[in-house]
Image: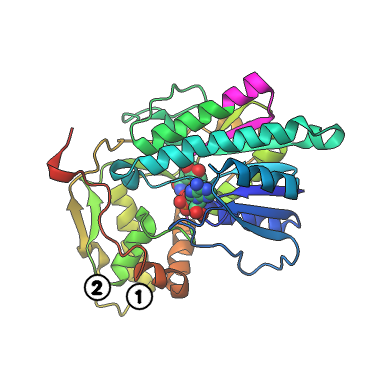
């Protein structure tokens, strides 16, 4: 297959690109190369003649139409997005442009392309939209999100993703575009941009800097290792039923404080001579994020039942791999930490404007 992956230079997109290249397929990566595009070249895989990078904006209709016409993909996996909730609080415009207008533009180009396909190519074509569990809003202490949970997004990020999910559904119902949507919980693993919780904590701890935990650290998230997500996505693309949505989760709920404490303990073990041990001493509680959802938890029984997917990593094994990767790959993150993102607090409203 030839797969057009959007956002393939980002954290999850680059894992998806590696997955398909390793399986012997061809990949076209459509990516604008924003600040978050930390992995534009797939590493450690022989991909001569099977990987092309197209630097373009998903919201640029002419560029996207040209890419469809030139590469003639068998399927599209749409991951390109502005993805950081904190940035969406202080700068929502980019989220509306990329996540909503960009998804609309890509859907229109995919529709025009699909309408001209015939025979096997038409039967095979899929538009796979990759989304988040954050569209469902926040849970209390009990319960899980299912595919039937009403959408109640609370941040500009989750609202823009919710809107994009609705567009994808409408392009299926109205125009018959063959779509599949997946909504996944928090991902972690190698090559995650250091503004996100886990890499930020690892890299701050290495420098002996405070580990900023929002509020009391009581917010609960479900965590999934990124390569397990990439496998679930490949299954959903290949075998998911058209027009359906599938939740994807790790079955590993932790409060943010528990998660950061686990990272500290892993670093204590990995770095017996660090002057910053015990790393738990670095934990610092800071002003909470505005509109911070209390708890996300995923019921992914549908995906497990219909497609037979199971994550391979537990949170313990995945976190150990992740810490080891950041310790061994300074060359990947040092230029980011000394340049485009130095670990500063994002997402605070000016003048104490809080709800
Ligand atoms: N990270 C998570 O925990 C998580 C969980 C569930 C779903 N998702 C979804 O998965 C997708 C990928 O997330 P991620 O964490 O890898 O994001 P990321 O921020 O690491 O990467 C996003 C990529 O999209 C590209 N991009 C941004 N705007 C673009 C535009 N206008 N045109 C073309 N390319 C553009 C960036 O250059 C970057 O390479 C997103 O759609 C996100 O909503 C993420």
Residue 161, given in percent of the width and then of the height, sits at 46, 35
State yes or no: discs 2 and 1 in contact (Cβ < 8 Å): yes
Per the rendering, the mark at residue 271 is: 1
Q: Residue at x 45, y 30 (%)?
A: 162
Point out the stretch of residues depicted in magenta.
169-188
Q: Quadrant of residue 302?
A: top right
Q: Which residue is mark 2?
A: 276
Residue 219, given in percent of the width and then of the height, sits at 29, 41
- 336 above or below 99? below
Q: Residue at x 45, y 29 (%)?
A: 145
Badge 1 marks a residue whose secondary structure is: loop
Residue 318, given in percent of the width and then of the height, sits at 48, 57
The answer to whether residue 247 is seen in the rendering is no
- 350 above or below 50? above
Quadrant that contains the C terminus: top left
Q: Residue at x 39, y 39 (%)?
A: 157
In the image, taking residue 43 as reference, residue 196 lies left or right, namely left
């Amino acid at each position: 297959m030839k797969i057009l992956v959007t956002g393939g230079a980002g954290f999850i997109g680059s894992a998806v690109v590696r997955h398909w290249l390793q399986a012997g397929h061809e990949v076209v990566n459509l990516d604008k190369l924003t600040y978050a595009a930390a992995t534009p070249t797939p590493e450690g895989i022989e991909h001569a003649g099977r990987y092309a990078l197209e630097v373009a904006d998903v919201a640029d209709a002419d560029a996207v139409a040209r890419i469809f016409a030139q590469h003639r993909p068998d399927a599209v996996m749409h991951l390109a997005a502005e993805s950081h909730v904190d940035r969406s609080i202080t700068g929502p415009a980019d989220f509306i442009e990329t996540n909503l207008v960009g998804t609309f533009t890509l859907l229109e180009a995919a529709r025009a392309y699909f309408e001209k396909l015939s025979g096997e190519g038409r039967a095979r074509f899929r538009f796979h939209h990759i989304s988040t569990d954050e569209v469902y809003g926040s849970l209390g202490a009990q319960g899980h999100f299912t595919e039937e949970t009403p959408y109640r997004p609370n941040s500009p990020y989750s609202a823009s993703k919710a809107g994009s999910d609705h567009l994808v559904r409408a392009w299926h119902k109205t125009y018959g575009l063959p779509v599949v949507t997946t909504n996944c919980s928090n991902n972690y693993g190698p090559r995650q941009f250091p503004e996100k919780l886990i890499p930020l904590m690892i890299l701050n701890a290495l420098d002996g800097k405070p580990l900023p935990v929002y509020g009391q650290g009581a917010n609960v998230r479900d965590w999934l290792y990124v390569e397990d997500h990439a496998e679930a996505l490949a299954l959903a693309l290949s075998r998911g039923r058209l027009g359906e949505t599938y939740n994807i989760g790790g079955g590993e709920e932790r409060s943010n404080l528990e998660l950061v404490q686990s990272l500290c303990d892993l670093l204590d073990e990995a770095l017996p001579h660090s002057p910053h041990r015990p790393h738990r001493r670095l934990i610092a509680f800071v002003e909470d994020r505005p509109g911070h959802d209390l708890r996300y938890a995923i019921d992914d029984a549908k995906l497990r039942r219909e497609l037979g997917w199971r994550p391979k990593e537990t949170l313990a094994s995945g976190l150990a791999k992740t810490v080891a990767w950041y310790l061994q790959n300074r060359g990947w993150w040092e230029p980011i930490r000394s340049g485009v993102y130095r670990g500063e607090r994002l997402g605070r409203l000016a003048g104490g404007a809080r709800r």
